[in-house]
Image (cartoon, rainbow, N blue to C red):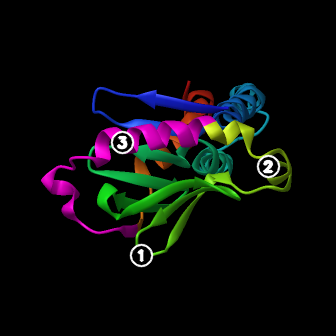
Amino acid sequence: MCQVGTSKFEQVVTRKSSFAVFGVVVPLVFALMADPAVLAGDLVHDLVGVLLFPLILGAMVFTIWLVTWRSSIRATPDALSVYNALLVHEIPWKEIREIELEDGIKIVLKSGKRVGSVAYGGSLLGSITGYPSYKKAVQRLRAVREDYGQDPPKAAQASERTYFSFPWAAAAAWYLFFAIPGFIHLYF
């Protein structure tokens, strides 16, 4: 299955459901295990521990979040964007030849270049079964292409680009998520 959502900004986001669930459950499990131990004073005893422990745990959970939740395919009226952890492939609709399901979901550009998705990558089981869980995402992306790709706005006249995108706010949030209990223990 895939998770498909829309927002008031006319953005369609497609995520692999199992990745999305994993990206929420794992941080909660880490929090349920670590936070009580931190609050009880079992894991951190001084300011250095309060600063370093969430850095390590936050980095692990942030990495899981990058691969599971952030890795997605997003469609706007201007372009189709494939988020692969820290890399973003932004492809204007006019550049897309096909959205195909072969060894995972691939965006085929008119130039012949293929852009794959971490979330919807190939697998042995998927190739044997025909990727049944990816078919809904492909159908939705093709439908969105029909809606958005017919009359692209002037902003969509740009060309395809790939860039590095580090979500600083999310990294800070994960750090604080694990740091706050330590500060509570240490100072209250």
Give the residue number, with chain letter if any, for mark 2.
126
Q: Which one is earlier in the sequence, the residue at label 2 or at label 3?
A: 2
- What kind of element bears circle 3? helix
Q: Was residue 84 drawn as part of the magenta stretch in this picture? A: no
Residue 78 percent coordinates (x, y)? 26, 50
Which of the image's four quarters has the N terminus?
A: top right
Q: Which one is earlier in the sequence, the residue at label 1 or at label 2?
A: 1
Three-letter code, disc 1: Ser
Three-letter code, disc 2: Gly
Q: Was residue 142 drawn as part of the magenta stretch in this picture? A: yes
Residue 26 percent coordinates (x, y)? 72, 35
Q: Is residue 93 left or right of residue 173?
A: left
Q: How far separated are the C-alphas under marks 1 and 3?
A: 20 Å
Three-letter code, disc 3: Glu
Residue 98 percent coordinates (x, y)? 48, 57
Mark 1 or 2, closer to the camera: 1
Q: Observer-nearest residue: 49 or 120?
A: 120
- What kind of element bears circle 1? loop
Mark 2 or 3, closer to the camera: 3
Q: Is residue 178 left or right of residue 77?
A: right
Q: Is residue 165 visible?
A: no
Give the residue number, with chain letter if any, for mark 3.
146
Give the residue number, with chain letter if any, for mark 1.
111
- Range of magenta residues: 136-162
- What kind of element bears circle 2? helix
Q: Observer-nearest residue: 27 or 82?
A: 82
Residue under the point 17% across and 55% down: 155
Q: Which one is earlier in the sequence, the residue at label 1 or at label 3?
A: 1
Residue under the point 46% across and 28% down: 5
Residue under the point 71% across and 30% down: 25
Residue 161 percent coordinates (x, y)? 36, 69
